[in-house]
Image (spheres, rainbow, N blue to C red):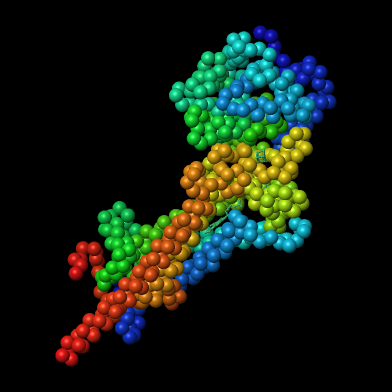
């Protein structure tokens, strides 16, 4: 742990570390709003459940509004994501992109160890040396990032065809033949949305759980930037090599 | 060798007036999306260039493309193609049969080596050496490869020969393949559709004659002028789509009023074709106009995108799952796993606490003793 990056507030029996800087927190909540709107409007585009009471098509623009909103928030989501990708490298050490060493055995050992930890409800007292994301979480977020990228590519490819040869079509038009026609592009866009929903279900309930039952300050860390550890906490390197009682 | 007839000479010989010829030129120029100043270029080309022979091959297909072409009621289109473009070989309509017919093809191809246009209808079965489709004693693969040698360009007419249609649908027992997967060393144009619109077929051929080149193609080898836009983006029911007014089921109030067919499975939003612009049968109507959703017949593998009356297809794993089911399954799976994990953790923590308390109690009791 680099001391200059640690921000400690000692109170009661815990130590707090300043982990998420303001950029990370703001971009996180922008994501929450954007993905929320994208899922809602996406659902409407897919299954238009509400019908305006009008008898004539003029005046009512429900679907058009939903599509425009979807596109607007898609652009917000994408720009936010791109900036966040940059911050992956430029932000503080807790971004820890450099720990994404899939070619090293330790990476997989740590991920496996953490997974077993979760599944068997073991919750050993060994704490990983990480305050940011552990290896398993890093892996999850990288997969999420890839999924979001494919979502963006497929989305912009579909949107681009409104104006063939235009800006978005020139940039993303190649995606459509890649997947063998727009019908498949649409299907993939929808499947990935379900994947993202699955992630969200897990993500939200888990941070609440960690906040309330494990007192790790996971949820509040996205608001205050502070993560909590027990007082006198000692980080452990390679906990999977420790013998368990 | 006798000088080859021009396109114009041929139509005149067949009793078509100059006025009708010019009308054809105007129409086709417009369909090709060219400026009006190009009309004279089209006229001059058709007047002066020798008409290129077209050989039309039928492989694994239902002949609906031929039907579309032959039955096109715009008089000029069929006349022009059948008499003027020198359709030298087309099994469905030619007089010759048997050995005689086969002789005509190979003779004609030899004579016009390097100059003729090959129009192919239908896919080519490749399994078991290609025995599932034979013409004149040759398998379709051999036939196609031989015929393609001297072709200037190959036009894949219809979805079967462009992308695969009913003949290549899952489980595809004959291993049928579209043309561009078999002929890779010649320019191939795809004109998908089941069937494609006659004007689109003719337009592409005229472009070939006039400019001696293929029209601009998109990444799926389709002429951009006809396949550059979605049905949806030129659909006259689009206002109802944008408003959110949908036909819920056939024969309901909305269907009678001509609302958008999205919810009864319209594939217009993912289908690239000219139906909503050129329309069918002398521009009379097209499926959506007569109240039926677009089936996406000009898109790759559209028979496998089932069920057809659903705007996003199921995942192509018949009898297994749909995109929505897979997605929901995943989301529900995560929810259940997360929930179980939560409950288990809470229970574990509670029992641990209880145990600790018990141990404490015991210790207290021991002390008291
Ligand atoms: C990041 C950039 C994104 C872009 C550019 C984008 C773009 C689009 C476009 C243009 C459509 C309309 C397709 C059509 O009607 O032809 C669409 C549909 C849809 N989008 Fe997105 N989208 C993006 C992200 C997302 C995300 C993050 C979600 C949800 C997690 C999502 C969920 C959906 C859904 C469910 C549909 C309806 C698909 C259908 O049933 O046809 N999109 N998107
Ligand atoms: S009927 Fe089909 S093509 Fe026309 S607006 Fe509705 S969804 Fe689009
Ligand atoms: S409307 Fe759709 S299904 Fe019908 S002919 Fe045109 S492309 Fe094919």
Q: Residue at x 60, y 25 (%)?
A: B120
As drawn, the residue found furthest toward the top would be: B1
As drawn, the residue found furthest toward the left would be: B369
Q: Is residue A130 left or right of residue B218?
A: left
In the depicted structure, whether residue A85 falls above or below residue B228: below
Which of the two residues, B343 or B214, is positioned nearer the viewer here? B343
In the rendered picture of this protein, how many numbered marks are placed on residues? 0
Quadrant including the N terminus of chain B: top right
Q: Residue at x 50, y 69 (%)?
A: A29
In the depicted structure, whether residue B61 falls above or below residue A238: above
Residue A210 in view, yes or no = yes
Task: Say which quarter of the image contains residue B29.
Answer: top right
In the depicted structure, whether residue B96 falls above or below residue A206: above
As drawn, the residue found furthest toward the front would be: B369
Q: Is residue B369 left or right of residue B43?
A: left
x then y, percent, for residue B162: 57, 32
Task: Say which quarter of the image contains residue B147.
Answer: top right
Q: Residue at x 83, y 22 (%)?
A: B17
Q: Residue at x 65, y 29 (%)?
A: B64
Task: Say which quarter of the image contains residue B194.
Answer: top right
Q: Assign ligand 1 to one image quadrant.
A: bottom right
In the depicted structure, whether residue B320 falls above or below residue B345: above
Which of the two residues, B333 or B163, is positioned nearer the viewer here? B333
x then y, percent, for residue A104: 28, 55
Quadrant including the C terminus of chain B: bottom left
x then y, percent, for residue B181: 51, 30
Q: Is residue B340 left or right of residue B96?
A: left
x then y, percent, for residue B76: 77, 26
Residue A185 in view, yes or no = no
């Amino acid at each position: 742990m680099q001391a200059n990056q640690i921000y400690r507030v000692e109170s009661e029996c815990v130590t707090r570390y300043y982990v998420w800087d303001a950029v990370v927190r703001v971009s996180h909540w922008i994501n929450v709003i954007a993905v929320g709107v994208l899922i809602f409007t996406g659902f409407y585009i897919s299954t238009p459940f509400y019908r305006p009471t009008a008898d004539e098509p003029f005046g009512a623009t429900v679907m058009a509004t939903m599509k425009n909103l979807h596109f607007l928030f898609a652009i917000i989501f994408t720009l936010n994501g791109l900036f966040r990708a940059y911050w992956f490298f430029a932000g503080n050490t807790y971004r820890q992109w450099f720990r994404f060493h899939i070619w090293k055995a330790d990476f997989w050992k740590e991920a496996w160890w953490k997974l077993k930890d979760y599944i068997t409800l073991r919750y050993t007292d060994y704490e990983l040396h990480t305050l940011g994301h552990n290896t398993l979480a890093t892996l999850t977020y990288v997969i999420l990032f890839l999924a979001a990228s494919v979502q963006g590519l497929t989305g912009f490819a579909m949107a681009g065809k409104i104006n063939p040869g235009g800006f978005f079509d020139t940039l993303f038009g190649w995606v459509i033949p890649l997947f063998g026609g727009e019908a498949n592009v649409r299907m993939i866009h929808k499947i990935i949305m379900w994947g993202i929903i699955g992630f969200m279900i897990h993500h939200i309930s888990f941070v609440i759980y960690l906040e309330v039952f494990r007192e790790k300050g996971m949820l509040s860390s996205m608001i205050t930037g502070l993560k909590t550890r027990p007082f006198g906490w000692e980080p452990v390197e390679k906990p999977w090599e420790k013998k368990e009682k | 060798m006798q000088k080859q007839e021009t396109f114009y000479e041929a139509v005149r010989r067949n009793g078509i007036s100059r006025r009708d010829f010019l009308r054809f030129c105007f129409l086709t120029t417009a369909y090709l999306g060219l400026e009006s100043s190009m009309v004279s270029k089209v006229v001059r080309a058709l007047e002066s260039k020798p008409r290129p022979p077209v050989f039309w091959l039928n492989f694994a297909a239902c002949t609906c493309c031929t039907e579309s072409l032959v039955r096109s009621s715009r008089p000029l289109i069929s006349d022009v193609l059948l008499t003027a473009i020198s359709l030298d070989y087309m099994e469905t309509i030619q007089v010759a049969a048997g050995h005689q017919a086969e002789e005509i093809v190979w003779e004609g191809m030899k004579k016009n080596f390097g100059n003729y246009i090959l129009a192919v209808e239908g896919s080519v079965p490749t399994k078991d050496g290609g025995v599932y489709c034979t013409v004149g004693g040759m398998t379709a693969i051999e036939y196609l490869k031989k015929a393609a040698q001297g072709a200037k360009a190959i036009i894949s007419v219809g979805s079967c020969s462009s992308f695969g249609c009913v003949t290549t649908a899952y489980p595809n027992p004959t291993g049928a393949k579209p043309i561009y997967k078999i002929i890779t060393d010649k320019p191939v144009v795809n004109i998908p559709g089941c069937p494609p619109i006659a004007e689109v077929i003719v337009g592409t051929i005229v472009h070939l004659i006039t400019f001696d080149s293929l029209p601009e193609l998109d990444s799926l080898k389709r002429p951009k002028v006809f396949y550059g836009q979605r049905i949806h983006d030129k659909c006259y029911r689009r206002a109802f789509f944008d408003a959110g007014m949908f036909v819920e089921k056939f024969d309901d109030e909305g269907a009678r009023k001509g609302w958008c067919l999205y919810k009864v499975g319209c594939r217009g939003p993912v289908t690239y074709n000219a139906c909503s612009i050129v329309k069918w049968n002398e521009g009379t109507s097209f499926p959506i106009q007569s109240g039926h959703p677009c089936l996406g017949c000009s898109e790759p593998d559209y028979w496998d995108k089932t069920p057809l009356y659903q705007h996003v297809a199921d995942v192509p794993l018949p009898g297994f799952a749909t995109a929505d089911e897979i997605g929901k399954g995943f989301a529900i799976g995560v929810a259940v796993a997360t929930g179980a994990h939560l409950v288990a953790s809470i229970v574990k923590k509670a029992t641990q606490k209880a145990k600790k308390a018990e141990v404490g109690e015991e210790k207290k009791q021991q002390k008291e003793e």
